[in-house]
Image: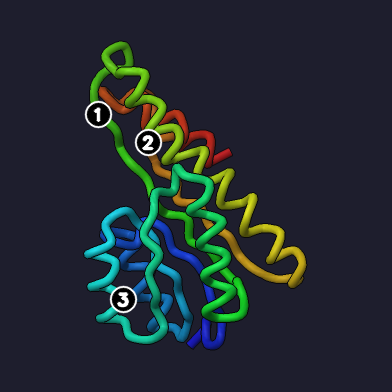
Amino acid sequence: MRLLGKAGIITGASSGIGEAGARLFVEEGGNVVLCARREDRLTALAEELGPHAIVLAGDVADEATHQALVTRCISAFGRLDFAFNNAGTVGPGVPLPDTSTDDWNVVIATNLTSAYFAAKYQMPLMLEAGRGSIVFTSSFVGHTVGLPGMGAYAAPKRALSV
């Protein structure tokens, strides 16, 4: 029960690592605001996890989503102690010269700009409280030398790692 009485935000919570994190954080006594674009999957997960999990569907590439997440966490649980900023996208998986500008912008916004938005809204509350932890999920792809079709994904993941 390491998170008993604590509250936080989990992005990318509708599947994979984010979903596993949500399960673990609630199991450890935490209260969580779950975020992802797939509201149906978030709602199903929150119903399974019980009253310690609530939903705010949204796109992490949208600044307003981050502001709403912090507001929702504070209004529901009275505090923000942790954030697991896990949402991300791989993108088209094509060689960089074949990546469209629109696809590039979506990957950068989802995987990097979203980290700025998260920090912008999460950090002030934690600094004011004198406590808190913020985690950003990166990837080994940001540290490898050349993976075909992963240029758009590797760039923001590397940026998160430094």
- Residue 143 in sight here: no
- Above or below 53: residue 157: above
- Above or below 91: residue 47: below
Q: Tag 2, which secondary structure?
A: helix
- Above or below 138: residue 154: above
Q: In which quarter of the image is residue 70?
A: bottom right
Q: Residue at x 26, y 24 (%)?
A: 149
- Give the number of the mark in front: 1 or 3: 3
- Bin the neighbour count of mark 1 within 10 Å (Cα to Cα): few under 14, some 14-19, many 20 and up: some
User: In this rendering, would 100 be left or right of 158?
Assistant: left
Q: Residue at x 30, y 18 (%)?
A: 99
Amino acid carrying mark 2 in the image:
Val
Q: Distance between the residues labelled 1 and 2?
A: 15 Å
Give whichever of discs 1 and 2 has the lower sequence position: 1
Rendered image coloring scheme? rainbow
User: In this rendering, would 111 be left or right of 161?
Assistant: left
Q: Which residue is drawn at 39% across and 78% down?
A: 53
- Above or below 6: residue 137: above
Quarter the C terminus occupies = top right
Amino acid carrying mark 1 in the image:
Pro
Give whichever of discs 2 and 3 has the lower sequence position: 3
Where is residue 1 drawn, in percent x and y?
48, 88
Instruction: Quickly name the residue at label 1.
Output: 92
Instruction: Quickly name the residue at label 3.
Output: 46
- In the foreground, 147 or 41: 41
Q: Tag 3, which secondary structure?
A: helix
- Give the number of the mark in front: 2 or 3: 3
Q: Which residue is drawn at 53% across and 46% down?
A: 63
Q: In which quarter of the image is residue 134?
A: bottom right
Instruction: Quickly name the residue at label 2.
Output: 141
- In the foreground, 133 or 12: 12
